[in-house]
Image (cartoon, rainbow, N blue to C red):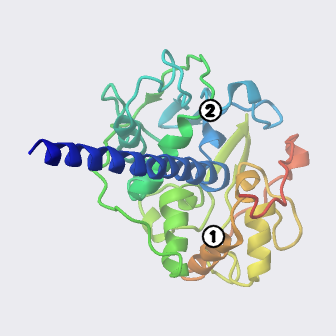
Amino acid sequence: MRNKSILVISLLVLAAIIATPAMAQTQKELVARGTYLVKAIVACDDCHTPKDAHYVPRANLAFAGGQEFKAPIFDAWSRNLTPDVNTGIGTWTDEQIMRAIRQGITREGDILGPPMPVPNFNTMADDDAKALVAYLRTLKPIRHENTRSVYKIPLQASPPPKVQHAPPKSDKVAYGSYIVNSLAHCFECHTAPGPDAEHRLGSGGFPFPIKEGVFVRSMNITPDKETGIGTWTDAQIRRAITRGIDKNGKQLVPIMPYGHFTNMTREDVDSVIAYLRTIPPVRNAVPPNPTPKELGFTIPKTGLLSKF
């Protein structure tokens, strides 16, 4: 009996030793996936890092929040995503961070409102939500207290997420839909607000205030041939996504986070293009925007496709 007990204990110890490297590798893979998602697609820091007058992110406050977003129905400030224990998410559990991302509920039970794209993130796959958390854990903690957001509308949390796995990459349209809707939340910016917004997805026209009396508007990314991207080639759409240059060679305003999208893999960009070809065309002529130079904006570095 004693020999049997020793044998069982030995087998358990051996199993733990064998499993440890596998678990460590899994965590390493999660961080790698999270790094790619943040730096190439989800672009958390695009909102959670304050920018200067030239729209350049303030490196000393990376992910520390404090970027203001004003609209008639809210005055919102991005939150601190760094692991700082006093002003960030350093004391939050993984489950609490995932709940904030996908349901819009903070550790304290507050509801996160727009422009945080919780309804989009609600359909994010479990593994990708875990990967984002794993990456955020690697950030340098920055002590930075931010202004509390104020809303003139009632806020409502999203339900517990139902999606557990992302579609297979072999299904380009389905995976492209997942990137556009659940990760990059493209339609949140490329659809103007209004009661019939669900029928105008991707048709552009969303106004972004730059300064007093100056707005830029998102472009129409539906396949409409006259006002959208219906006549654009795949190469032209790819260039717009990853380098911020439209069909006619005009530089797009960097509110479009092409400085992040330039890091997407060719496979992921092509999936996005395949999906955009399938959405309903919507006729909506969006007025041309000023150029980044006219706005005094610095153009982010691009051309790093498939960096990761």
Q: Please say if 278 is above or below 266.
A: below
Left or right: 42, with 165 as reference point: right
Picture coordinates of residue 196 (x, y %)?
43, 64
The mark found on residue 63 in the picture is: 2
The mark found on residue 291 in the picture is: none
Q: Could you say which is closer to the camera, residue 224 or residue 15?
A: 15
Left or right: 87, with 62 as reference point: left
Q: Could you say which is closer to the camera, residue 244 or residue 306?
A: 306
| Location of residue 281 by image quarter | bottom right
Q: Please say if 108 is above or below 55.
A: above
Residue at 50% across / 81% down in the picture? 171
Q: CA distance from mark 1 to mark 2?
A: 25 Å
Picture coordinates of residue 270 (x, y %)?
66, 76
Q: Which element type, helix, strand or loop, lies under badge 2?
A: loop
Q: Which element type, helix, strand or loop, lies under badge 1?
A: helix
Q: Could you say which is closer to the camera, residue 178 or residue 19?
A: 19
Residue at 60% across / 51% down in the picture? 32
**Earlier residue among tags 1 and 2:** 2
The residue to which callout 1 is attached is: 268
Q: Would residue 280 be seen by someone viewing this image from the given angle?
A: no
Picture coordinates of residue 47 (x, y %)?
62, 39
Q: Would residue 62 be seen by someone viewing this image from the given angle?
A: yes
